[in-house]
Amino acid sequence: MSLENNVMKQWAIKYATLGFAVFPLKPRSKAPATSNGFKSATTDLQQINTWWDSTPLYNIGIATGAASRGLLVLDLDEDDKNNKHGPEEVRKWLAQRKTDFPRTAMVKTGRGGIHMLYYGRGGNRSNLLSGVDVRGEGGYIVAPPSVHPNGNTYEWLCPFPPPIAAANETVYDFIRQTDSFGGSRGLQLELSIPEGQRTDAMIKLIGSLKSKGLSDEAILAAVRTENEKRCYPPLTDRELERQIFPAVYRGWREERPYKARFNSETGSFQRGRNNSLDMAVMDKVEEKQPEWLIPGYAPRYQITSLAGDGGSGKTTVWCAIAAAVSSGGGSFLEYYTPEDWAKRKPEKVMFFSAEDSYEYTLKRRLRKNGANLANILSIDVADDRFQDVKFNSPYLERLLDYHRPALCVFDPIQAFVPPDIRMGDRNAMRSCLAPLIGYGEKYGTSFLIVEHANKQSGVWGRKRIADSADIWDISRSVLMLGNTNEAGVRYLTHEKSNYGPLEETVLFTIEDEKVVFKGHTTKRDRDFVVEESFNTRQKPQRDEAKNFILDFLKDGEKEVSELDEMALAMGITKNALKNAKTDLRTERKIKTWSIGYGESKKYFISLLEALPYSQ
């Protein structure tokens, strides 16, 4: 097999070690070579070897979106024949707004265009501007050194591994815009809307069409068409009838924030704000000590955020917390608290879940974690009323007023944000969530909001809360979930507390859908993220550099400069090479020495056992 025939596999493995899910494309083509296309993308090295050993000249596809750590790509096409000038269109857009994108990794495509790679959230969109597409969730890109049908190769325009930046508001504003120079064309749906985002997207479409004055019949027809065209898989007729179409008849204009408030005493809605000139005088204000729903971790009457990566156990953890509140027992967060102290009065819990069925999943998890099921209330996602449960909706306040739960859980946050709120807009989420603070004191309810963590590598704390920094700001307590390096062991770390010191990080496992306490640690989310970054990114690079050095020196001693130049040509970074040399010296596998003086001085490197004498 020739060197050329090995190159594609070597690069596919490099991408996989960086966390990019790869799959084969037909030689000199953008077309997938597997029947499942990008859905077969993987980081499994055994599968990658199998694919490229069978056909060494396969091009390389990288799945974008969550499969590759949240990869989001701006595809700027340059094609004079078809009058596409993506880079120029983008420059005009940025110049008009006097801004710029974050510096990030870029690829020159086979047709002369550019791929700009970011870590962020979003789906696929086409023709934002002439020759400008977006590749995100449900999409893929062709990766270097794949060969274009015209014979040109895709090339990195930056060092490797690529320095990929996080998408900022400028990137998201660019993706959201739909006209070259201002002038919105209304809501633009993504090309492919995956399961989990379909309901939200279709309801937003209804709101957009309502604002344009379309008739109900026209809206129903448009939703059916877009569902079949864009949702993967399409919602069934039953799902449309029960989850989507009721929103057509909703009073959209009355559900905007703070436009109408429900008065439980009169049973009617009151419009407008309270503009009384009365103010609180501090010498009359009673000082209070914070009360705790879960001592140290979750304050009463306030918002606590629970964020974590996919597969970190968010649902099981909130079920365990809800079970403890409903039964009056201690939660796994209070493992060392004496049993008599942890005992409390059983209280009501209300939850709303847009991701899991309470019939098939949640009731079982609540029961296994010891819940008093008679104290737990919910509305099923298939119920027409579920779509009216929004953070600032009058209907949510009515439910809280009537049932008076001690805890109310929302999972995930995106399902309960009104359609006219953009989560990425600064202060938008603060205004959206603000009513919960008032509800907390008024109805004696604490709120637990479940969020997805940012998939961008190498960030922690505030930056780990996906979608909006406002969520971190308005939460009085923030809990982060993740997986440790020990198989099956997860962590819950206390990252923010407005009412006391941060509590210890709890280690736990999930056994038979039940949370099992394993111990405490002084590590925080930052420590675990850095550790994972080292194991998934830096360690493979260091190991690759060590293997290169050992292989390069197997024929005898070399000049250090010669080794360094060859390592750079192989795509090994200076930092990885430096660390690899340090490791190999510590392991007593290599030795370096110098000969000569001044300008004639040269440095040599050799395998230790190959030295003729001890240096």
Image: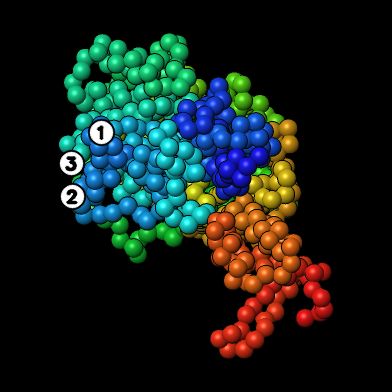
Q: Locate the N terminus and report the quarter of the image it occupies.
A: top right
Q: Nearer the viewer, residue 428 or 43?
A: 43
Per the image, the residue denoted by label 3 is 181
Element at label 2: helix
- Please indicate whether residue 285 sits to the left or right of residue 596 in the image: left
Q: Is residue 573 above or below residue 348?
A: below
| One can see residue 514 in this view | yes
- Please indicate whether residue 24 sits to the left or right of residue 259 in the image: right
Residue sitting at x 42%, y 32% = 149
| Numbered badge on residue 96 | 2
Image coords of residue 541 (percent x, y): 61, 56
- Identify residue type, mark 2: Gln
Element at label 3: loop
Q: Locate the C terminus and report the quarter of the image it occupies.
A: bottom right
Per the image, the residue denoted by label 1 is 81
Nearer-N-terminus badge (1/3): 1
Nearer-N-terminus badge (1/2): 1
